[in-house]
Image (cartoon, rainbow, N blue to C red):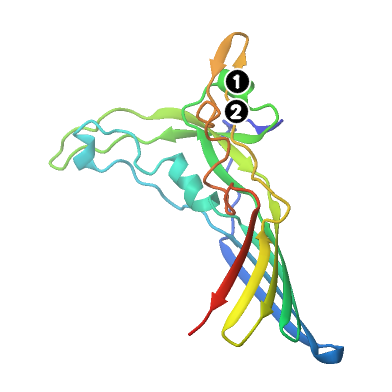
């Protein structure tokens, strides 16, 4: 179990750098007997953070909406809902009418809020076997309405359980044969090795008590946050015709 407990200290946080980096390399080699080998490599890495999140607008606060509209779930979705790093490697071999392509893709870690307003008992019951971290936030007081109306509600503390989904490698393989300049037949596989993302936190019964995970009682074992889906391998055969 990999879990970080919420830090209640008032120590200053280190400043984090916001950046984005992309690199693409492509090369084509002429081989013997009219063969060519084209390879490509692409890498991207980025990081972002929020600098400020405002409280609930006064107009909504007077209606009883006192919790932030942009909560921890939205923050994690914006800053960690996509991989911070991606790597793609591809090679294409051409000889006459035939070509073959092999592509490797590495998707970096992603995160999502598995549970909001979670308790210590829930964390202890659900976290074993998963990579998670607990994040505690103090929700700001909802501002009062214009004209001097008093503030509504008070600051509250909420702990969310963030699940970390592991980086994964996905492999594609494609073979093509060109009958004519307009007609091509292809066979191949997307996600050749049937790779699936990390499973959602599974609901469990611990000491006679049911702790609900984010798998909807087992009906949704995989998260839609996965950058490569959760349908496993896909094999195909197709004919392409151009006009």
Q: Position of residue 62 (x, y in %)?
A: 19, 34
- Element type at marker 1? strand
> Which quarter of the figure has residue 124?
top right
> Which quarter of the figure has residue 133?
top right
Disc 1 to disc 2, how far (Cα)? Answer: 6 Å
Label 1 packing within 10 angstroms: few (<14), some (14-19), many (20+): some
Which residue appears farthest toward the right when viewing the image? 32
Residue sitting at x 59%, y 8%: 208
- Element type at marker 2? loop
Q: Where is residue 18 in the image (x, y as percent from the top left)?
A: 56, 61
Q: Can residue 13 be seen in this view?
A: no
Q: Where is residue 15 in the image (x, y as percent from the top left)?
A: 58, 53
Which residue appears farthest toward the front when viewing the image? 179
Residue 91 lies, with reference to residue 234, above or below; the image says below
Residue sitting at x 53%, y 57%: 48
Q: Position of residue 183 (x, y in %)?
A: 58, 81
Residue sitting at x 58%, y 66%: 20
Quadrant where the image shows the N terminus: top right
Q: Is residue 144 left or right of residue 241?
A: left
Residue sitting at x 56%, y 75%: 240
Residue 218 lies, with reference to residue 181, above or below; the image says above
- Please say if the residues under marks 1 and 2 sit with CB atoms less than 8 Å apart: yes
Q: Which residue is label 1 attached to? A: 204
Q: Which residue is label 2 attached to? A: 202
Q: Nearer the viewer, residue 174 or 110?
A: 174
Q: Which of 241 and 59 is in front in this view?
A: 241
């Amino acid at each position: 179990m990999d879990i970080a407990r919420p830090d209640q200290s008032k120590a200053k946080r280190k400043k984090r750098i916001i950046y984005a980096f992309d690199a693409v390399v492509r090369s084509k080699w002429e081989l013997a007997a009219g063969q060519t080998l084209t390879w490509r490599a692409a890498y991207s890495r980025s990081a972002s953070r929020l600098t400020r999140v405002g409280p609930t607008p006064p107009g909504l606060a007077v209606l009883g909406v006192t919790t932030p509209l942009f909560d921890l779930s939205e923050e994690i979705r914006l800053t960690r809902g996509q991989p911070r790093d991606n790597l793609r490697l591809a090679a294409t071999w051409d000889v006459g009418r035939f070509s073959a392509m092999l592509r490797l893709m590495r998707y970096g870690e992603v995160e999502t809020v598995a549970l909001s307003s979670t308790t210590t008992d829930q964390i202890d019951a659900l976290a074993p076997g998963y990579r998670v971290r607990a994040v505690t936030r103090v929700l700001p007081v909802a501002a009062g309405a214009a004209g001097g109306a008093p503030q509504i509600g008070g600051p509250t503390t909420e702990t969310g359980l963030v699940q970390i989904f592991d980086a994964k490698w996905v492999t594609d393989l494609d073979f093509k044969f060109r009958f004519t300049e307009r007609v091509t037949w292809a066979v191949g596989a997307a996600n050749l090795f049937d790779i699936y993302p990390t499973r959602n936190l599974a609901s469990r019964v611990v000491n006679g008590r049911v702790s609900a995970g984010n798998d909807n009682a087992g009906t949704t074992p995989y998260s839609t946050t996965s950058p490569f889906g959760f349908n496993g391998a896909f094999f195909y055969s197709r004919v392409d015709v151009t006009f």
